[in-house]
Image: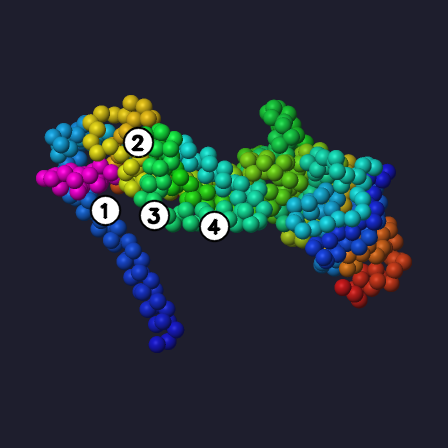
Amino acid sequence: MDKITVEHLSFYYGDKRALKDISITIKDREITALIGPSGCGKSTFLRCLDRMNDTIPNTRLEGRVLLDGCDIYAPDADVVELRRQVGMVFQRPNPFPKSVYDNVAFGPRILGINGNRELDDIVEESLRGAALWKEVSNDLRQDALSLSLGEQQRLCIARAIAVRPEVILMDEPCSALDPIATLQVEELIRQLKERYCIVIVTHNMQQAARVSDRTGFFWLGELVEFDMTDRIFTSPDQRLTEDYITGRAG
Amino acid sequence: MDRHQVQRVGFILLAAVAAIVVIPILVVIGIIAVEGAGALSWEFLSAMPRDGMRAGGILPAIIGTLWLTLGTALVAIPIGVGGGIYLAEYARDSLLTRAIRLAIINLAGVPSVVYGLFGLGLFVLFFRFGTSIVAGSLTLAIMTLPIIISTTEEALRAVPTEFRTVSTSLGGTRWQGIRRIVLPQAMPGVITGVLLGLLRAAGETAPILFTVAAFFLPRLPQSPFDQTMALPYHLYVISTQVPAMPDEIKYATALVLLVLVLSMNVVATLIRSTYRRRREW
C-alpha cells in the first residue's frame, strides 16, 4: 500500500535549490532507506515529509507531498496533527532531561491524555515496542540521561511511538552509537516495520542493505535511483549509483 | 621569564584582582554588621519609630519595603517574563524587535532618579494614584522590567533548540513546547533574573522618592493607595535629614536592608543550584 507519494518536490534555501524535482512513492509497512553523501539533500527531504522545514526561515517548497492521498502542504492541512501522524527520530539521542517515564509520556500528555492508568499503559506499551522495557521497567523514574546512548536512542523511539504515529522518520539514528547499540537499534527498526511505515536516512550503506526493503540514492539534491534494496546493491541501473555504493564516487 | 613563571605571575595578578573586588564588599558588610549589631533588637524590628525617629523601631519602613517589593513583583514578573518569552520564542528578527531590544538595553541604563520623575508624572499626577504604594510599585516595576526581560530571554535562548524540535515533532504546538519543556529548563535563569530585578527594586531610593515614600509616618499602610515609609528612603532620611541621629541606628537600619536583600540573593542562588543539579546538557 502506498503511504507517502511525493510529486515533483523541489526545496530551496533562499536561492539555493537543495532538492530537485523529486518524485517517489513510499510503501506502508516497509523500510525505505535513503543513502547518499553528506549535503545531498537526504535529511532535507526527510524533513519535508513532516514539514519540519517549515520553521526554517527563508525556505520555499514546490511540488506535492501526499500522505494517504492528502496533500500535507495544502493550505487547510493541520500541521500539528500531521506531525503526530509522522514521528521523527534524530541523529543524536536527545531525550529530555526528565525521567524515562516523563519522556515517553510527553507526547501523550501534549495530546491531552492525563489519566494515570492510561499513561502507564501507553508508557509500558511504547517501551516494549522500543525493546527497552526490560532494561528500564524496574525504575521508570530514573533520569533518562543516565541511560547509555543506545538506550537513550531507543527511548527516543519509544517517545516517538507513544503518540501512535503511522510513519516514523529516522535521520541517521545510529550514527552516534557504538556497533552493538547500532545492531540493537537496527533489530528494533526491523520489528517496527510490522506496524509502521519507516523512512531512514543513513550514511552507512551496510546499514541500508541490512535493514531496508527499498533504497533511494540521492546525489546533489536529486534522487538518482530508487528501487528494491537488493537490486540497488547488486545491479543498479545507474552508473552513478554503482560508483557510489562501490566507493568510487562520493 | 619562562612560560611557567608567566603563568604563576598571571595567576597572582588574577587572584589580586579577585581580592580587590571581594575585600571591599566584605569590609563594608563587616563594618555595618559590627556598628549596627548593638542597636538590633526585637523592638527595633517590631516597633514604630519614636522621638523623631531617634528611638524605637523601623517596622513601618520594613513593612513598606516588603509591600513595595510585592507590588513590583506582581506587575513586573508577568510582564517581564512574558516579554522575555515573546522576544526569545516568537518575535522574528525585524526592525521592530531590534527597536524593542535597543529600548530595553537603554532602559537598563537610565538613572533611577529619572524613573522616579517619570513615575511622578505618569502614575502620581496623570493617573491620579497620588503618592501611593501603587504608584511606587509601578515605578519600580518599570525600572525592573529590562532586567527581567533580558535575563528571561537569555535563559530561554540557552535551552537547546532540539527540545523545541522534538516537541514539535511529537505533535506539540509551539506554546506546548515552551510551556512543558523550554520554560521549565530555563526556570533557574528566569528566577535568578526575577530575584535580581526585585532585589534592585527593594534597595532603590530615587524611584520611590516622589512616588510613595513618606518622610515619617508612624503607622502601617492601610491600603495600596496609602503612602508608606521604606527602608532605603528611611536610611537616607535618618542619615541626612535628622540632626543628632544616633549612628548605631543608622547602621542597624542599613544592616536590616542588607540582610533583606542578601537573603533574597541567597534564595536565588539556592534555587539555581537545586535546578542545575538536575540538568546535564
Q: Please, is residue A249 above or below residue A18 in the view?
A: below
Q: Which of marks 1 and 4 is nearer the N terminus?
A: 1
Report the span colored magenta.
B232-257
Say if residue B275 shows up in the picture. Answer: no
Q: Distance between the residues labelled 4 and 2?
A: 31 Å
Residue at left offset 31%, top offset 35%? B211
Q: Residues within 10 Å of mark 1 (few under 14, many from 20)?
A: some
Say if residue B172 shows up in the picture. Answer: yes
Disc assigned to residue B111: 3
Residue at left offset 63%, top offset 44%? B165
Viewer-proximal residue among B52 and A134? B52
Q: How crowded is mark 4: few (under 14 residues within 10 Å), some or many (20 or more)?
A: few
Type of amino acid at the residue the image marks with label 2 = Thr
Whether labels 4 and 2 share one chain: yes
Type of amino acid at the residue the image marks with label 3 = Pro
Q: Distance between the residues labelled 1 and 4?
A: 36 Å
Q: Which of marks 4 and 2 is nearer the N terminus?
A: 4
Is A166 situated left or right of B164 in this image? right
Residue bearing the label numbered 2: B131
